[in-house]
Image (cartoon, helix red, strand yellow):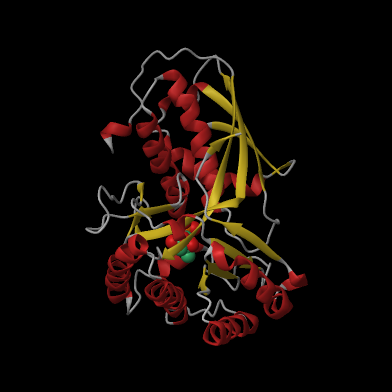
Amino acid sequence: MEQRFIFKNRKPRLDVFHTVWQAPSNIALIKYWGKTAPQLPKNASLSFTLSDAFTQTAVTFKPLKTPTETVSFRIVFEGEEKPSFRPKLETFFEQIVLYQSFLLHYTLEISSHNTFPHSSGIASSASSMAALAACLMDLEAQLSPMSEDLKKEKTSFLARLGSGSASRSIQGPMMAWGAHEAIPHSSDLVAVGVDAIHPVFQSYCDTILLVDKGQKQVSSTLGHQLMHNHPYAEQRFAQANRQLKNLVPVLQSGDLDAFIPIVEKEALDLHAMMMTSDPYFILMQPNTLHIIQAIWSFRTKTNIPVCFTLDAGANVHVLYPKNVAKEVMAFIESDLLSFCENRQCVHDRVGVGIKKA
Ligand code: PMV
């Protein structure tokens, strides 16, 4: 139990409270893949906070006459009640009620939607858990006033218990999660902002190419589990921490020639873990590889610093600085969209984190 995150006000004043928050998705440059209970990472990770791909969540908290034993809630997603979302939320509330005992005095009406297309293969657990955590923390701060810094920190802490990567969606332009010597104040419990980022990375662009909009073949829950008996697990965790250490000075200097190989290698390392686990998976599709090849030839031909990263799926995140956005977008349109389902992509960029709507 993390004592400093426990809610302490014994007699909070209970009124109806309604709040709405937006939380963005994030894309890891150094990937988190492998964890131990309770949702603690096996290596440190670092991500760009995105901007336009976000979840908006509204919660109405209605006080109850007698407290319940487990958190009482209803979940509506994009206008429809979603029983299939309940198990993940029930587990989340079981974890966090230790830190927010006041939740047992309310029933929660949660209503949520994403700005990115439904079942686009873009992970929504980070943005949705961060948005929900922001709503819960808004109420907590009413019941027991706290500093903005503590509020953000605990938002990341709660979001992490819902989905590890959600801890990194709280602020921009970048966050790191997991204790690491190269990141001051870093911790396995909460994500922290990465300081002194070169201006080129503060407006970086990410176009997400929707290669496969289907359900993920491997849930991240299963993926993390597969790292338990993985023959290369220990090397991978050490490698990720080394790559993070190498990336930090690059983020400060803005050296894109050094940035690109670290980021692309991380994406391929993540997929290499899936290809060599038991059972094994190939999450890339033929079009994922076509896109990677096309990015490499375009980069060689033009010297434009565009690169890719991947999540645990077939979609490709195309990363590039804002000053070449025009050329890269023309290249995406002419050479890459034909590899996407219905030529679909989402143009996004680095953002600032959670916002009250
Ligand atoms: O937060 P989870 O449990 O959904 O895991 C996310 C894992 C990756 O998206 C593949 C990598 C990352 O660090 O975001």
Say above or below: 76 vs 38: above
21 sits left or right of 210 in the view: left
Question: 250 or 219: nearer the eye?
Answer: 250
Quarter of the image where the C terminus is located: top right
* Residue 23 location, quadrant: top right
Question: 304 or 75: nearer the eye?
Answer: 304
Quarter of the image where the N terminus is located: top left
- Residue at (29, 69) in percent of width and height: 246
List x then y, in percent, for residue 209: 64, 69
Say above or below: 188 vs 309: above
Question: 216 or 98: nearer the eye?
Answer: 216
257 sits left or right of 284 in the view: left
List x then y, in percent, for residue 227: 38, 70
List x then y, in percent, for residue 71: 51, 31
- Residue at (67, 74) in percent of width and height: 332
Q: Report the number of discs.
A: 0
Say above or below: 283 vs 19: below
Residue 332 visible to the viewer: yes
279 sits left or right of 178 in the view: right
List x then y, in percent, for residue 95: 41, 41
* Residue 215 location, quadrant: bottom right
- Residue at (64, 49) in percent of width and height: 84
- Seen as rendered, the residue at the extreme front is 323
Residue 70 visible to the viewer: no
- Residue at (37, 74) in percent of width and height: 258
